[in-house]
Protein backbone atom coordinates (compact mmCIF):
# COMPACT_ATOMS: atom_id res chain seq x y z
CA UNK A 1 0.00 0.00 0.00
CA UNK A 2 1.47 3.36 -1.05
CA UNK A 3 1.11 6.07 1.59
CA UNK A 4 0.38 9.51 0.21
CA UNK A 5 0.21 12.73 2.26
CA UNK A 6 -3.08 14.56 1.85
CA UNK A 7 -2.49 17.90 3.55
CA UNK A 8 1.20 18.63 3.94
CA UNK A 9 3.15 18.19 0.73
CA UNK A 10 5.56 21.07 1.27
CA UNK A 11 7.19 22.65 4.33
CA UNK A 12 5.36 25.90 3.54
CA UNK A 13 2.08 24.08 4.20
CA UNK A 14 2.92 23.41 7.85
CA UNK A 15 1.12 25.52 10.47
CA UNK A 16 3.23 28.52 11.43
CA UNK A 17 1.80 29.38 14.84
CA UNK A 18 4.03 28.28 17.72
CA UNK A 19 2.63 26.75 20.91
CA UNK A 20 5.89 25.65 22.53
CA UNK A 21 8.06 28.71 23.03
CA UNK A 22 11.85 29.11 23.51
CA UNK A 23 13.56 29.08 26.84
CA UNK A 24 12.77 25.61 28.16
CA UNK A 25 15.11 24.08 30.76
CA UNK A 26 15.38 20.81 28.79
CA UNK A 27 18.77 19.65 27.55
CA UNK A 28 20.20 21.36 24.48
CA UNK A 29 19.46 19.38 21.34
CA UNK A 30 16.55 17.39 22.84
CA UNK A 31 14.92 15.51 19.96
CA UNK A 32 11.78 14.91 21.97
CA UNK A 33 11.19 18.63 22.42
CA UNK A 34 11.59 19.15 18.68
CA UNK A 35 8.87 16.58 18.00
CA UNK A 36 6.55 18.13 20.58
CA UNK A 37 7.03 21.58 19.10
CA UNK A 38 6.08 20.30 15.63
CA UNK A 39 3.12 18.31 16.97
CA UNK A 40 1.82 21.28 18.95
CA UNK A 41 1.51 23.29 15.74
CA UNK A 42 -1.14 20.80 14.68
CA UNK A 43 -2.71 20.26 18.11
CA UNK A 44 -2.99 23.99 18.84
CA UNK A 45 -3.44 25.63 22.23
CA UNK A 46 -6.74 24.03 23.28
CA UNK A 47 -4.93 21.14 24.93
CA UNK A 48 -4.51 19.68 28.39
CA UNK A 49 -1.12 18.01 28.61
CA UNK A 50 -1.03 15.24 31.20
CA UNK A 51 2.65 14.76 31.97
CA UNK A 52 4.09 11.52 33.33
CA UNK A 53 7.12 12.15 35.53
CA UNK A 54 10.18 12.20 33.31
CA UNK A 55 12.37 14.52 31.25
CA UNK A 56 9.42 16.64 30.11
CA UNK A 57 8.50 17.36 33.72
CA UNK A 58 11.14 20.08 33.50
CA UNK A 59 9.08 21.81 30.79
CA UNK A 60 6.72 23.40 33.29
CA UNK A 61 8.36 24.40 36.58
CA UNK A 62 5.81 26.44 38.51
CA UNK A 63 5.11 29.25 37.91
CA UNK A 64 6.89 29.19 34.53
CA UNK A 65 5.91 27.29 31.38
CA UNK A 66 6.83 27.56 27.68
CA UNK A 67 3.40 26.24 26.68
CA UNK A 68 0.25 28.17 25.84
CA UNK A 69 -1.83 25.17 26.91
CA UNK A 70 -2.87 23.60 30.22
CA UNK A 71 -0.60 21.25 32.16
CA UNK A 72 -1.23 18.48 34.70
CA UNK A 73 1.65 16.69 36.38
CA UNK A 74 1.26 13.04 37.44
CA UNK A 75 3.42 10.22 38.69
CA UNK A 76 5.28 8.11 36.15
CA UNK A 77 2.75 5.29 36.28
CA UNK A 78 -0.54 7.20 36.31
CA UNK A 79 -0.67 9.65 33.39
CA UNK A 80 -3.31 7.66 31.42
CA UNK A 81 -5.44 7.51 34.59
CA UNK A 82 -5.02 11.27 34.95
CA UNK A 83 -6.07 11.68 31.34
CA UNK A 84 -9.18 9.61 32.07
CA UNK A 85 -10.12 11.96 34.89
CA UNK A 86 -9.65 15.06 32.76
CA UNK A 87 -11.56 13.61 29.80
CA UNK A 88 -14.42 12.39 32.01
CA UNK A 89 -14.68 15.77 33.74
CA UNK A 90 -14.88 17.58 30.40
CA UNK A 91 -17.54 15.19 29.11
CA UNK A 92 -19.64 15.56 32.28
CA UNK A 93 -19.45 19.36 32.11
CA UNK A 94 -20.54 19.35 28.48
CA UNK A 95 -23.33 16.87 29.18
CA UNK A 96 -24.66 19.19 31.92
CA UNK A 97 -24.39 22.22 29.68
CA UNK A 98 -21.80 23.86 31.91
CA UNK A 99 -19.14 23.77 29.19
CA UNK A 100 -19.98 24.66 25.58
CA UNK A 101 -18.88 21.97 23.16
CA UNK A 102 -16.88 24.53 21.19
CA UNK A 103 -14.75 25.02 24.32
CA UNK A 104 -13.79 21.36 24.51
CA UNK A 105 -10.06 20.60 24.53
CA UNK A 106 -7.81 17.71 23.50
CA UNK A 107 -6.27 15.55 26.21
CA UNK A 108 -2.65 14.61 25.49
CA UNK A 109 -0.47 12.36 27.62
CA UNK A 110 3.25 13.11 27.52
CA UNK A 111 5.44 10.21 28.61
CA UNK A 112 8.99 9.02 28.14
CA UNK A 113 9.84 5.46 27.25
CA UNK A 114 10.31 4.54 30.92
CA UNK A 115 6.69 5.43 31.60
CA UNK A 116 5.29 4.27 28.25
CA UNK A 117 7.04 0.92 27.92
CA UNK A 118 7.21 0.11 31.62
CA UNK A 119 5.80 2.06 34.56
CA UNK A 120 2.44 3.13 33.08
CA UNK A 121 1.78 0.13 30.86
CA UNK A 122 -0.97 -1.19 33.14
CA UNK A 123 -2.91 2.09 33.33
CA UNK A 124 -2.34 2.62 29.60
CA UNK A 125 -3.79 -0.78 28.78
CA UNK A 126 -6.83 0.05 30.87
CA UNK A 127 -7.31 3.41 29.18
CA UNK A 128 -7.11 1.82 25.72
CA UNK A 129 -9.53 -0.93 26.71
CA UNK A 130 -12.01 1.71 27.96
CA UNK A 131 -11.60 3.45 24.56
CA UNK A 132 -10.55 6.69 26.21
CA UNK A 133 -10.47 9.51 23.68
CA UNK A 134 -6.92 10.82 24.13
CA UNK A 135 -3.56 11.26 22.46
CA UNK A 136 -0.52 9.53 23.89
CA UNK A 137 2.78 11.09 22.84
CA UNK A 138 5.89 9.12 23.84
CA UNK A 139 9.26 10.83 23.48
CA UNK A 140 11.45 7.75 23.21
CA UNK A 141 15.07 8.36 24.23
CA UNK A 142 15.61 4.68 24.99
CA UNK A 143 16.54 5.05 28.66
CA UNK A 144 15.36 6.46 31.98
CA UNK A 145 16.93 9.75 30.94
CA UNK A 146 15.72 12.03 33.71
CA UNK A 147 17.15 9.96 36.56
CA UNK A 148 20.61 9.11 35.27
CA UNK A 149 20.21 7.27 31.94
CA UNK A 150 19.41 3.82 33.33
CA UNK A 151 18.33 0.82 31.24
CA UNK A 152 14.67 0.89 30.17
CA UNK A 153 12.58 -1.63 28.20
CA UNK A 154 13.19 0.62 25.18
CA UNK A 155 16.99 0.43 25.43
CA UNK A 156 18.29 -1.32 22.30
CA UNK A 157 20.72 -4.20 22.14
CA UNK A 158 24.32 -3.06 22.41
CA UNK A 159 23.67 0.31 24.07
CA UNK A 160 25.57 1.39 27.15
CA UNK A 161 23.61 2.87 30.04
CA UNK A 162 24.53 3.50 33.66
CA UNK A 163 22.95 0.16 34.61
CA UNK A 164 24.07 -1.77 31.53
CA UNK A 165 27.72 -0.75 31.29
CA UNK A 166 30.23 -2.32 28.97
CA UNK A 167 31.95 -4.96 31.14
CA UNK A 168 33.93 -8.17 30.87
CA UNK A 169 30.76 -10.17 31.54
CA UNK A 170 28.71 -8.14 29.04
CA UNK A 171 31.07 -6.55 26.50
CA UNK A 172 28.16 -5.47 24.31
CA UNK A 173 26.46 -3.43 27.04
CA UNK A 174 22.69 -4.05 26.97
CA UNK A 175 21.87 -7.63 25.98
CA UNK A 176 18.08 -7.20 25.76
CA UNK A 177 16.09 -6.40 22.63
CA UNK A 178 13.92 -3.31 22.58
CA UNK A 179 10.30 -3.94 23.54
CA UNK A 180 7.90 -3.51 20.61
CA UNK A 181 5.39 -1.13 22.18
CA UNK A 182 3.88 -0.38 18.76
CA UNK A 183 2.68 -3.99 18.49
CA UNK A 184 1.57 -4.09 22.12
CA UNK A 185 -0.66 -1.10 21.45
CA UNK A 186 -1.84 -2.58 18.15
CA UNK A 187 -2.92 -5.76 19.96
CA UNK A 188 -5.41 -3.56 21.87
CA UNK A 189 -6.95 -2.51 18.52
CA UNK A 190 -6.93 1.29 18.98
CA UNK A 191 -8.06 3.39 16.01
CA UNK A 192 -4.71 5.05 15.37
CA UNK A 193 -1.02 4.56 16.22
CA UNK A 194 2.06 5.93 14.50
CA UNK A 195 5.80 6.45 14.74
CA UNK A 196 7.22 9.90 13.98
CA UNK A 197 10.55 11.68 13.69
CA UNK A 198 11.25 15.43 13.82
CA UNK A 199 13.55 15.00 10.80
CA UNK A 200 10.42 14.17 8.77
CA UNK A 201 8.16 17.07 9.75
CA UNK A 202 5.65 16.63 6.92
CA UNK A 203 5.14 13.00 7.90
CA UNK A 204 4.73 14.00 11.56
CA UNK A 205 2.23 16.78 10.88
CA UNK A 206 0.23 14.59 8.51
CA UNK A 207 -0.11 11.85 11.11
CA UNK A 208 -1.24 14.14 13.92
CA UNK A 209 -3.78 15.67 11.56
CA UNK A 210 -5.07 12.28 10.36
CA UNK A 211 -5.44 11.06 13.94
CA UNK A 212 -7.91 13.84 14.77
CA UNK A 213 -10.52 12.06 12.64
CA UNK A 214 -10.57 9.07 15.01
CA UNK A 215 -12.37 8.85 18.33
CA UNK A 216 -10.48 6.87 20.93
CA UNK A 217 -6.89 6.24 22.03
CA UNK A 218 -4.14 7.43 19.68
CA UNK A 219 -0.43 6.69 20.15
CA UNK A 220 2.53 8.58 18.71
CA UNK A 221 6.01 7.18 19.25
CA UNK A 222 8.44 10.02 18.73
CA UNK A 223 12.13 9.38 18.09
CA UNK A 224 13.94 11.46 20.73
CA UNK A 225 17.66 11.70 20.04
CA UNK A 226 19.25 12.44 23.43
CA UNK A 227 22.68 14.13 23.42
CA UNK A 228 23.02 13.81 27.21
CA UNK A 229 22.27 10.10 27.42
CA UNK A 230 23.53 9.00 24.02
CA UNK A 231 26.80 10.93 24.33
CA UNK A 232 27.01 13.11 21.25
CA UNK A 233 27.31 16.83 20.60
CA UNK A 234 23.85 18.51 20.55
CA UNK A 235 24.74 20.00 17.16
CA UNK A 236 24.41 16.51 15.69
CA UNK A 237 20.86 15.80 16.88
CA UNK A 238 19.45 16.21 13.33
CA UNK A 239 22.07 13.84 11.90
CA UNK A 240 21.40 11.17 14.52
CA UNK A 241 17.63 11.42 14.05
CA UNK A 242 17.80 11.16 10.26
CA UNK A 243 20.33 8.34 10.34
CA UNK A 244 18.09 6.25 12.62
CA UNK A 245 15.36 6.34 9.98
CA UNK A 246 17.63 5.89 6.96
CA UNK A 247 19.36 2.81 8.41
CA UNK A 248 15.98 1.23 9.18
CA UNK A 249 16.22 1.12 12.96
CA UNK A 250 13.33 3.60 13.37
CA UNK A 251 10.66 2.74 10.78
CA UNK A 252 8.07 5.39 10.03
CA UNK A 253 4.63 3.79 9.97
CA UNK A 254 1.02 4.08 11.07
CA UNK A 255 -1.74 1.61 11.92
CA UNK A 256 -5.36 2.59 11.31
CA UNK A 257 -7.73 0.15 13.00
CA UNK A 258 -4.90 -2.38 13.07
CA UNK A 259 -3.86 -2.09 9.41
CA UNK A 260 -0.17 -1.12 9.21
CA UNK A 261 1.23 1.10 6.47
CA UNK A 262 4.84 2.21 6.25
CA UNK A 263 4.98 5.89 5.37
CA UNK A 264 8.63 6.01 4.32
CA UNK A 265 10.93 3.41 2.81
CA UNK A 266 14.54 4.23 3.71
CA UNK A 267 17.67 3.56 1.70
CA UNK A 268 18.82 1.19 4.48
CA UNK A 269 22.30 2.52 5.02
CA UNK A 270 24.53 0.31 7.24
CA UNK A 271 23.57 0.50 10.90
CA UNK A 272 27.20 1.24 11.73
CA UNK A 273 26.76 4.74 10.27
CA UNK A 274 24.10 5.43 12.91
CA UNK A 275 25.85 3.69 15.80
CA UNK A 276 29.17 5.49 15.25
CA UNK A 277 27.50 8.86 15.84
CA UNK A 278 26.89 8.05 19.53
CA UNK A 279 29.17 7.46 22.48
CA UNK A 280 26.77 4.92 23.96
CA UNK A 281 27.84 2.50 21.20
CA UNK A 282 31.55 3.42 21.13
CA UNK A 283 32.52 0.19 22.89
CA UNK A 284 31.27 -1.75 19.85
CA UNK A 285 34.09 -0.17 17.82
CA UNK A 286 36.87 0.50 20.37
CA UNK A 287 39.34 -0.85 21.37
CA UNK A 288 38.32 -3.66 19.00
CA UNK A 289 35.37 -3.97 16.65
CA UNK A 290 32.69 -6.32 18.03
CA UNK A 291 31.74 -7.81 14.69
CA UNK A 292 29.24 -10.32 16.08
CA UNK A 293 27.29 -7.64 17.95
CA UNK A 294 27.19 -5.36 14.92
CA UNK A 295 26.12 -8.25 12.68
CA UNK A 296 23.37 -9.12 15.17
CA UNK A 297 21.95 -5.58 15.02
CA UNK A 298 22.16 -5.45 11.23
CA UNK A 299 20.55 -8.88 10.88
CA UNK A 300 17.52 -7.84 12.91
CA UNK A 301 17.06 -4.68 10.84
CA UNK A 302 17.37 -6.63 7.59
CA UNK A 303 14.88 -9.23 8.79
CA UNK A 304 12.34 -6.53 9.70
CA UNK A 305 12.46 -4.87 6.29
CA UNK A 306 12.38 -8.21 4.51
CA UNK A 307 9.06 -8.90 6.27
CA UNK A 308 7.80 -5.44 5.35
CA UNK A 309 8.76 -5.82 1.70
CA UNK A 310 7.20 -9.28 1.57
CA UNK A 311 3.96 -7.89 3.00
CA UNK A 312 4.01 -5.10 0.43
CA UNK A 313 4.48 -7.53 -2.46
CA UNK A 314 1.75 -9.89 -1.30
CA UNK A 315 -0.68 -7.05 -0.60
Image (cartoon, helix red, strand yellow):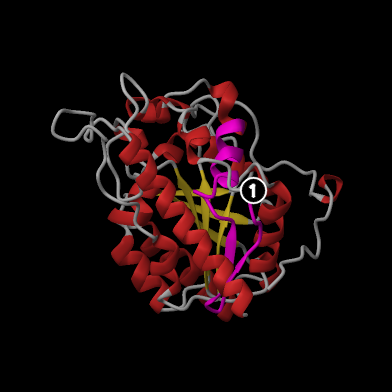
Q: Is residue 126 above or below residue 290?
A: below
The answer to which image quadrant residue 265 occupies is: bottom right
Q: SS for tag 1?
A: loop
User: Which residue is outermost to the left?
Assistant: 169
- Residue positioned 30% across, 50% down in the render: 153
State whether residue 60 appears in this view.
no
- Residue positioned 18% across, 35% down in the render: 170
State whether residue 197 appears in this view.
yes
Q: Is residue 202 above or below residue 228?
A: below
Specify the segment rendered in magenta.
239-267
Q: Where is the N terminus found, in terms of image quarters?
A: bottom right
Q: Closer to the camera, 33 or 43? A: 33
**Percent position (x, y) of residue 130?**
41, 79
The answer to which image quadrant residue 116 occupies is: bottom left
**Percent position (x, y) of residue 138?**
47, 52
- Residue positioned 35% across, 47% down in the render: 296
**Percent position (x, y) of residue 184?**
38, 68
The residue under label 1 is: 267
Q: Is residue 250 magenta?
A: yes
Amino acid sequence: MVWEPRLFKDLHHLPREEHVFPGTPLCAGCGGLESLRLASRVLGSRVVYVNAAGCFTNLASFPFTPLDASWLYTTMGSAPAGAQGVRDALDVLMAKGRLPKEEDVRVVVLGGDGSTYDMALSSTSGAITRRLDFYYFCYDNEAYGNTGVQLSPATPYGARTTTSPCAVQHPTGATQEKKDIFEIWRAHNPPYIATVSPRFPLDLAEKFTRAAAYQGPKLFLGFAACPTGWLFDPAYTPDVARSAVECGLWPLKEAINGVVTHTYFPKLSPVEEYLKLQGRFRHLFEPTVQKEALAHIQKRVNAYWERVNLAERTG
